[in-house]
Every structure is written in structure tokens, then in C-alpha cells.
Amino acid sequence: MGESYREPPPLASPPAGSETNFYKLPGFQHKPLTSAVYDAINAAIVRGGLGGNEIHVLGILKENTMPSWRIRISTALFMLVPHSLFAMNFDCVGSACPSIEIIGDSVSTLPNGEPSPFSGYADPSIRRDPTSGDIWMAYSWPNLGVAGDTERRRPFRRSRNVVPGVDIHLAKSQDGGRSWRFAGKLWRSIPSASPDGGTGHMGHEVANILPVKTPAGIIWYGARLQYFLPDEGGFRKRPVSSFRILIGSAREPSALADGPVARLGSMKTDERWGVDVNLASLSPQTRHCMLWNEPALYHDGNELFLTLSCMAFRGKSPDMKNNDLVVFATSASGNPSQWQWRFAGKLADAREARELGGERLTQVDLFKGRDGSLLAVVTPDTWESGDFVHHGCRVVEVDTSGNALKLARASQGHLKVRASILASDAGSAGTAACSYEPSSETGIIMTKRIKEGGAVSQATSLKAALHRTGIHP
């Protein structure tokens, strides 16, 4: 983190007879208390007019020899703490946060039937059909296969070139989210060649779906990240020039698989991959966006809004201070490839990331709460030892004034945080994406992952699962 260590002040005892809950300081697990963290805690106390008994910064705790700063809060005084630091808190562990089973869609195995080191469910996007009441979920389905065999029909031999892939699957619940059934493959890996003639396939990740009522009926919108995965090298050799956001519309979720799309590029996208619009060129505020990731959709009745993670770099490392969440909007009329886009502001930047416990915000989703407010769920993360480390999910209100979207702030200046979802049993890579649909009994769905062997692109094992928190922000 590059900051000097500051010894905390003497600690007061908690109020007599009060119960206490324990929460990790978001985004700073396994780190010494730095000056910035100390100042943030102190500022929160000052803003809330709180005394020394409401927030107690504990010393370094030894857990498997790894230090971890924790905060102890008197539950009796919990609601007095500014929402910028604490809101509805939940630790997604054990039986309190069970995993979701999708009937009919087992996690992937190796082509010979052995357990796959790259498997599970991840990146959920959950929405209710306004007509039928069914709840749909798009999710990533990571897998390993044989090069050139996306249908997984060739006999498996370990001497063959085994390549990773990510497909997007679709599931449906007809009982309010209590159970889920597989509804088909939404976007599968497509054999392809690079502009230079290399062989591989087009992979998909981080899908987002959205139903919108129109005078002509329900229209479903779908967006996802697409990139080229070469047969030689897999994720480590993905050409960044192939990263594009694909977005389209259809009359039902499953029809998004084959419908027309717009291919949206960034400053690093090579037009030879196919680009309809370079969104990064639409505003001086986005011309540092080398890659797009993590699309999220919202419709206000007039325009379709697309929020993207803007990935900026300094050399080969991410420029975390300039990795913003940016928004574009379109009337979405006609063929998607002809949609006219405008820049609609920044949802968040480094300031909001720091306030929520990270260096940047990613894995965004947009949805309405049960009270009708527009909310965003985001993941604060940090860049550590050549990898992105995720620190749970935060749910924050969204300000929709001025034909733009941005995270909302209270009159005192702090973000209007509704919920913080953590997982104290998360591995070194942390948690992953969250999603929410107010009519689903799942509450917020959190992705948890177990990774071994270096950064994600170099991992020897990566397994993911979806968990129901039951939390309704």
C-alpha cells in the first residue's frame, strides 16, 4: 500500500452489557492499519459525532500468522454509524449462506469425466420476467476442453492441448428463487481464428440481462464481454485487442443467443475483430479506457444505460486510480449495430472506491430495490502481487438526476450505502460478483471462488459457486 504505519490510540471498553459483532474493515484484510485507514475511521467518528465507545479499533490479531485489523461495533449503537462505513452487514459463511444448486446443469468435468480444476458457477445476473413472474439467471460456466473441440466430443488424453473456456448458461426459477433449473446455453464458446490466423475460440464472460416493458411487449436486453482464447496459451495469451462488449435485444432471454448485436470497442480494440462503435472515443473522460469489462444494464423508460468497468493501464500494470465505472446511454431503437450512443457520466471513480474499501470498483450490477430506489452493487478490489483481490460487495443508492448515473451521496457527503456483504472464509483472491432481484428469496447472490496457483490467468485451479445471502437491501 506504500503508506506509513500508525499506532492506534488507546482503546476504550465497549458499553457494559452491550452485544458486539465483528466485521473486517472492508478492503484491508490481512494488512496493517495504515494512515489512510486510520484517518478514514477517525473521520467517520467525527462525522457521526460518536464517542470512543461506539467504534473500537482492535490491535493486530494473529490468525494463521496473518495479521487482520478488525472493527468491533456495539450493535445497540449500530444505526448511528455513518452509512459510508457501515450499513447492513452480512458475512456469507456456512449454513447462513448456502450455495445454489442448478438442477440439470452440473459443474463442468474434464472430457474424460474426471473433476475439472476449472469449474463452477459465477458472475450471476438475475431478473424477473414482468409478465410471467419467472425469475431468470444468466451465469458464467467455466470449463476445460480439448483445443478445437468446443462440443467436447473428442476422447480426452492429457497429452492433448487442454484449453480453458467460459460459456454463459441460463437458469430459471418458477417458485420465487427457492429452486433453479437449467434453461439452456445462452452463449457458448465459438471456434474462431485471430486476424493473424491463429486458432482458438471466442469466449464469453460477465453477462448481464434486463427485461423492459414497452408498448409492443417485453424486450430483453443482454450484454457480455467477448474475447479470443488461443489454443496455445489460454487466458495468459488472450489478445487484449479482442476484448469487446456485445449487446443485443430479443423477445425472450433464450433468444438473445442468436439475436443481432452491437460490438462495442475501446481504445485497445483492434477493428479487425469487428467493431461497430468505439465507446471510449465518445468523451475525453473515457479516452484512457484501454479495455471494457463487467457490463451492467438499466432502463429509465426512455433510454438504455450501459455501465462498464473502464480498465486503464500504466505499462503492464493496471492504473487503479483511473479504473472508473463509466456510463453510456442509447435509445436502443432499430438494429443494435446502428444504435446511437452518448456518454452519460461516471458512476464512480477512485474516490468512491477508497470510501468503499478498495483501490477501484468493479463487477457492477444495477437493479431496483424493494422500495423502488435504483441501486448498484459493486466489488471493491485492490491490486496485490500481480492479481486483483476482491473484498466483498457493497450495495449503494444511485443518483439518476441530470440524464446521468452516479453513486448517491447523503447531504453530509458520504455514500448512501445500503449493505456490505463479506465472506470471512474467502481465499487469497477474495470473493467475486454479486447480483440481486427484489422478488427472489435468494436475496443478494454472491459468488465465492477458490483459486490456487498465482494470478487468475495463471491459476492451476479455480472453482466458483453462487450463494444465497437472503439479504434484501
Image (tube, grey):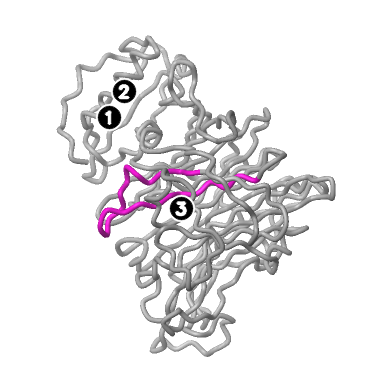
Q: What span is in magenta? A: 304-326
Q: Position of residue 252 (x, y in %)?
A: 76, 58
Could you tell me which residue is drawn at 32 percent across and 19 percent down? Answer: 43
Could you tell me which residue is drawn at 44 percent across and 78 percent down? Answer: 163
Q: Position of residue 151 (x, y in %)?
A: 59, 81
Asked if the residues shown at circle 1 and circle 2 are in contact, with their CB atoms under 8 angstroms apart, the answer is yes
Say which residue label 1 marks: 37
Point out the frontmost of discs 3 and 2: 3
Q: Is residue 319 above or below residue 51?
A: below
Res 457 visible: yes
**How far apart are the alpha carbons under marks 1 and 2?**
6 Å
Asked if the residues shown at circle 3 and circle 2 are in contact, with their CB atoms under 8 angstroms apart, the answer is no
Residue 229 falls inside the magenta stretch: no
Say which residue label 3 marks: 281
**Which class describes the residues within 10 Å of circle 2: few (<14), some (14-19), or many (20+)?**
some
**How far apart are the alpha carbons under marks 3 and 2?**
39 Å
The residue lying furthest to the right in this view is 216
Q: Nearer the viewer, residue 167 or 401?
A: 401
Q: Position of residue 443 (x, y in %)?
A: 62, 40
Residue type, numbered disc 2: Ile
- Whichever of labels 1 and 3 marks the residue nearer the N terminus, that label is 1
Res 423 visible: no
Residue type, numbered disc 3: Ser
**How far apart are the alpha carbons under marks 1 and 3?**
36 Å
207 horizontally vs 136: left or right: left
Q: Secondary structure at mark 1?
A: helix
Say which residue label 2 marks: 41
Q: Within the image, what quadrant is residue 164 found in?
A: bottom left
Q: Is residue 463 above or below residue 176?
A: below
Q: Secondary structure at mark 3?
A: helix
Q: Nearer the viewer, residue 48 or 315?
A: 315
345 horizontally vs 251: left or right: left
